[in-house]
Image: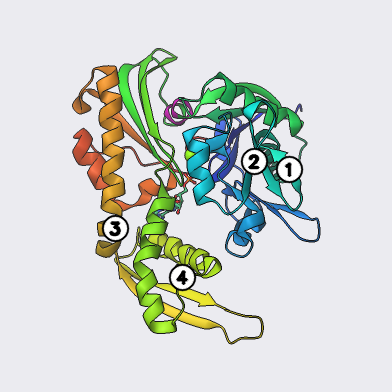
Amino acid sequence: MPAPAVGIDLGTTNSVVAVSLAGRPQVLSDGNHGPLIPSVVSFLESGERLVGRTARVRRAIDPAHTVASVKRLLGRPFKSEEVRRAKSRVAFDLKEGPDSSVVVSTRGGDFSLPEISAMVLREVRRVAEQGLNQRIDRCVVTVPANFNELQRSSTKIAGRIAELEVIRILNEPTAAALAYGYGRGTREKICIYDFGGGTFDVTLLELAGNVFEVLATAGDTFLGGDDLDAALADWLVPHLLRTTKVDALQDRVAYDILRDAAESAKCALSTQEATTAEFVYQPRKNADPLRFLHRITRAELERLAAPFVSRTFDVCNEALKLAGLKANDLTAVILVGGSTRIPSVRQRVASFFGRDPLTNLPPEEVVAL
Ligand code: ADP
Ligand code: MG
């Protein structure tokens, strides 16, 4: 049997690969680690390179050589606002490359952004080949609806470097609508609300038969779950200082560990009313590890998250205005992105659009499916 083409959601934070077997789409997993492949590459001192799950844990240990969230910079000029903002936020080094492109400079060498994306795609391919026990060489890759030609061609170049033939580039919101079974004849206008790790995107689609027309798309490339992690970490800083004397604002590694603790707590609070954030830190080699535990309630997280969630609706209003539509003109709202697991996000989406959003499919997997 010829190898099937796989569908790849090459995400800012996580990538996911899916395949259609006997007409049924399903995500592929790395053993029992689940389907999310962190879009992270870490360059070790030994010269070795880690990609995906093993690279992600190095964000807090070796942030200067652990490269993440490059997608929002793909195909953007070095002097753009996005690159300037990213430079002030990330610990790895971004330099200007040929034709005002962006180059990531690491101890493992300098790499273009398509080269970094290709490293992630190779890992995605490995997961797919292991899951299917078959060689894979063709794929469909999804991109945000607002990606321009340069960003789309950079995505194709990444595929080529990874020796994958990209047979089609598909818009992420269109992919999500297909996964929910749209595109079989109904004529309606729907909304795809995508709140991921680093970015927020909203797209209004008009469906007519199997044609998906983008009526409007709007987004914020610096609005996502990462902001919630940082807000919660910032809120924990004074508590940590009081209990352990560690000032995370003066200690990058401590802050990154605190942020990881905040993210775990945030995710737990989507299904629990309260949880305990756990911070374990060894300030120096051979020093005793410090342990800090702090109880957080869902209400506290929701209060910290509220201003960020509000910003997503400013973006929704922008898209509605562009399309000349009102929130209740839409006949369905599809939730995409891990941050839409937060109960208050779901509630606020429901009240903004005046209808319950579709949530049957896992929001991190729906685009790949
Ligand atoms: P992206 O599209 O940016 O690649 P994802 O859709 O995988 O990313 O979303 C990643 C974000 O979702 C992260 O910020 C992560 O913390 C957040 N997330 C994942 N699961 C949950 C959860 N249960 N509750 C809240 N946030 C979650
Ligand atoms: Mg995504």
Q: Which residue is mark 3?
A: 304
Please state which amino acid type lies under the numbered disc 4.
Ala
Q: Nearer the viewer, residue 142 or 240?
A: 240
Q: Nearer the viewer, mark 3 or mark 4?
A: 4
The numbered mark, 3 or 1, whose residue comes first in the sequence reads 1
- Label placed on residue 248: 4
* Residue displayed at 46% across by 26% down: 178
Give residue 288's position: percent from left, percent from top. 58, 87
Q: Nearer the viewer, residue 172 or 7?
A: 172
Is 199 left, or right, of 358 in this rendering? right
- Label placed on residue 354: none
Is 158 left, or right, of 225 in this rendering? right
Q: Which residue is mark 2?
A: 95
Residues at marks 2 and 4, CA–CA distance in whole angstroms: 28 Å
Give residue 239's position: percent from left, percent from top. 35, 76
- Label placed on residue 110: 1
Q: Nearer the viewer, mark 2 or mark 4?
A: 2
Give residue 169's position: percent from left, percent from top. 58, 23
Please state which amino acid type lies under the numbered disc 1.
Asp
Numbered range of the magenta stretch: 173-177
The numbered mark, 3 or 4, whose residue comes first in the sequence reads 4
Residues at marks 2 and 1, CA–CA distance in whole angstroms: 9 Å
Please state which amino acid type lies under the numbered disc 2.
Lys
Asked if labels 1 and 2 touch by Cβ distance under 8 angstroms, the answer is yes
Element class at badge 2: strand
Asked if labels 4 and 3 touch by Cβ distance under 8 angstroms, the answer is no
**Magenta part mainly helix, strand or loop?**
helix
